[in-house]
Amino acid sequence: MPIATPEVFAEMLGRAKSQGFAYPAINVTSSQTLHAALRGFAEAESDGIVQVSTGGAEFLSGATVKDMVTGSVAFAEYARIVADKYPVNIALHTDHCPKNKLDGFVRPLLEISKERVAAGKEPLFQSHMWDGSAVELEENLQIAEELLAASKAARTILEIEVGVVGGEEDGIVGEINEKLYTTPGDGLRTAEVLGLGDKGYYMAALTFGNVHGVYKPGHVKLRPEVLKEIQDAVGAKYGKEKPFDLVFHGGSGSTLEEIHEAIEYGVVKMNIDTDTQYAYTRPIVDHVMKNYDGVLKIDGEVGNKKVYDPRSYGKAAEAGMAARVAEAAQQLKSAGNKMR
Ligand SMILES: O=C(CO)COP(=O)(O)O
Ligand SMILES: O=C[C@H](O)COP(=O)(O)O
Ligand SMILES: [Zn+2]
Ligand SMILES: [Zn+2]
């Protein structure tokens, strides 16, 4: 299928919200991990979202080039061509963008989409995330307001973060901190500044103890009921049920129970990276261990070409990651539910 148009992506999210399921949003960093995600969605008969982080975008431009816009544009153009061969709807998204990277990532990408739209084309991506979790709420929302207007002009959706996701990314590692839980007051202020759809379409990553990475049980406490409290408080004020379209960060390692409860409270997108990274890399490790002699160069003799051909372990990696993506679609109930 062609990459989701703005209309198709809005329809995807609307269905998820009204039917009580969510889309896996899979972080990818290469053409191969992209194919793994596309294949996993196709095998699960699920529509889905693929996303690149700032580091992923840099890497996609070339490990020494390190230009986030070059990497993002190349990725989106490539994805647009190959996704067409898979029978599901895919939206392209950019992940966490902190304030100091906006000018080198989200702002220029929004500008490119705005120009494309003005020329009668589709936007480059379907959505972008502004991660204002490192700044005060008022500044976070002020920047979000500016980016929401730009997103509207670019026909893209904005994802914001209110609260903090734990793990290395936002600097809270190994502790249970109150910042990891968004409050109803934060939710009310968000609706006040950004509206509820009237100023443009946005999704909100409200945090409920989410952490990037996978840790031993008990390390952090996911409290999905925090989402319900916020939806109820904002919903009561504006007379709207589940007013926010929510994003669940740190999906890896979450239990089915936590996932289903979060969906019940309005989660429509769940990000998964660590588990799919593992699922991709583990078969490569297996391949190398099993074929160790074949990848050795001894006395000028170069092992077995068949086993160091990147395609040999690349295919195994793609299959491993695709299976984890399909599993995510099952857990999120998007499996078997593709739009057309
Ligand atoms: O939230 C994420 C990306 O934004 C992914 O988190 P995990 O790596 O914990 O799955
Ligand atoms: O934000 C979390 C994702 O796992 C992206 O990670 P990354 O910045 O290492 O690409
Ligand atoms: Zn954050
Ligand atoms: Zn995240």
Image: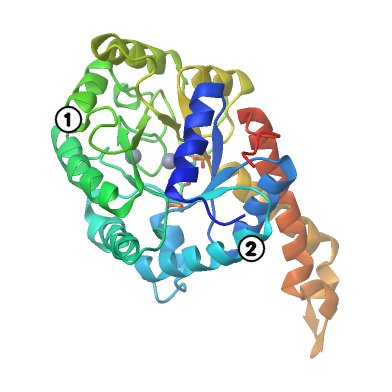
Residue 272, how many percent across, how many down?
54, 41
Q: Residue at x 41, y 29 (%)?
A: 246
Give the labeled residue for mark 1. 193
Residue at the outermost bottom position = 300
Instruction: Compute the Cα span from label 2 to label 1.
Output: 40 Å
Disc 1: CA contacts within 10 A as few (<14), some (14-19) or many (>=20): some
Give the labeled residue for mark 2. 32
Mark 2 residue type: Gln
Disc 2: CA contacts within 10 A as few (<14), some (14-19) or many (>=20): some
Foreground residue among 262 and 154: 154
Q: Residue at x 42, y 50 (%)?
A: 126
Q: Nearer the viewer, mark 2 or mark 1?
A: 1
Residue 247, how many percent across, how many down?
43, 32
Q: In this view, does 300 lie to the left or right of 40?
A: right
Which type of secondary structure does the marked residue at label 2 adopt? helix
Residue 37, how many percent across, how many down?
63, 51
Q: Is residue 139 left or right of residue 282?
A: left
